[in-house]
Image (cartoon, rainbow, N blue to C red):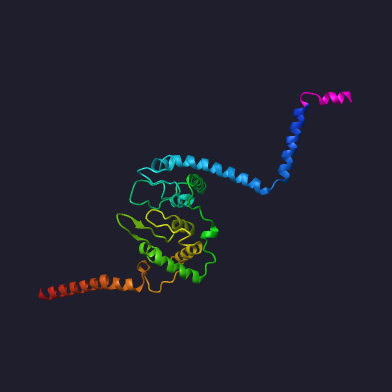
Amino acid sequence: MKKLSARRRHPLAAIVVLIFALAATGGLYAAFAPAGEAQAGETAAAQSLAIEEGKKLYAVGCSSCHGTGGQGTSDGPSLVGVGAAAVDFQVGTGRMPMQAPGAQAPKKPVMYSQAEIDQMAAYIASLGPGPAIPTEEQYGTEGVSDEEMAEGGVLFRTNCAQCHNFTGEGGALTRGKYAPDLTDVSAKHIYEAMQTGPQNMPAFPDTVLPEEEKRAITAYLQQVNSSEANTPGGFKLGGYGPVAEGLFAWVIGLPILVGVTVWIAARNAKAKKS
């Protein structure tokens, strides 16, 4: 008993007991704590890491035009509040970073991987609230019915055709600007463009065009521009239909035929005189 009492009074005994108590508490917490709390902690840590990595990428590739803190400069607008979706669209389509100042940023090969784009998007999203990158459930067109697709065509012709043409094949605007061709644009980027309004395009948030209407518009574009699209009228001249084709025939085709006829008659008359 005396030996046991002496061990209990040893100066390190309290430290050993504290270590065992902490280990037991940690083990019990890990075993019985709600899984959601642990996942939330891991998610927050991953998000913080993504923001830090995105900040580094932004400093190298974007800060010279948009400012060190995204506040904007004379060479580029402020990015505070544009949201992650705007970054995913602009960088994911190669429009940013721009190669040179111009009236409009053209689509070009993408310079970053999707992981790097996500990191930059996380950093820009941390500067101010804005549209998030949509999920596949939001922009996916699988399951869109023919009726919904037809309604998407009506919505597109009402809101978008004045710039993008009736079938999304693009068109010219003023001062060197243009509405791009939407033929090969992914459903995700079409959704993000409607959500964020890049460059000259107005934004169509969910309060203006709900998710289901955006999906319907995207499904319509994919259908009319697919390789299986039925065009019984022949060459579609941008999708305007028989009116445009008839106008082309009268304004271009007929004058050419008349000109050729006059030229042949003039040559025959000249040959007869000689």
Q: Position of residue 174 (x, y in %)?
A: 30, 57
Choose between 89 and 16: the one closer to the eye. Answer: 16
Asked if residue 220 is positioned above or below residue 189 in the image, the reply reads below
- Quadrant into which the N terminus falls: top right
Asked if residue 168 is positioned above or below residue 47 in the image, the reply reads below
Q: Position of residue 131 (x, y in %)?
A: 48, 53
Residue lying at 34% horizontally and 61% vertically, measured from the top left: 171
Q: Is residue 167 visible?
A: no
Asked if residue 233 is positioned above or below residue 118 in the image, the reply reads below
Residue lying at 44% horizontally and 71% vertically, measured from the top left: 230
Classify residue 42 as left or right of residue 198. right
- Magenta span includes 271: no
Classify residue 19 as left or right of residue 81. right
- Magenta span includes 9: yes
Choose between 152 and 12: the one closer to the eye. Answer: 12
- Quadrant into which the C terminus falls: bottom left
Q: How many marks?
A: 0
Q: Position of residue 263 (x, y in %)?
A: 18, 72
Classify residue 144 as left or right of residue 182. right
Choose between 240 and 256: the one closer to the eye. Answer: 240
Residue lying at 88% horizontally and 23% vertically, measured from the top left: 2
Choose between 198 and 29: the one closer to the eye. Answer: 29
Q: Is residue 148 visible?
A: yes
Farthest residue in the left direction?
273
Residue lying at 65% horizontally and 46% vertically, measured from the top left: 37
Asked if residue 79 is positioned above or below residue 184 in the image, the reply reads above
Q: Quadrant of residue 268?
A: bottom left
Q: Position of residue 128 (x, y in %)?
A: 48, 47
Q: Which residues are magenta?
A: 1-12
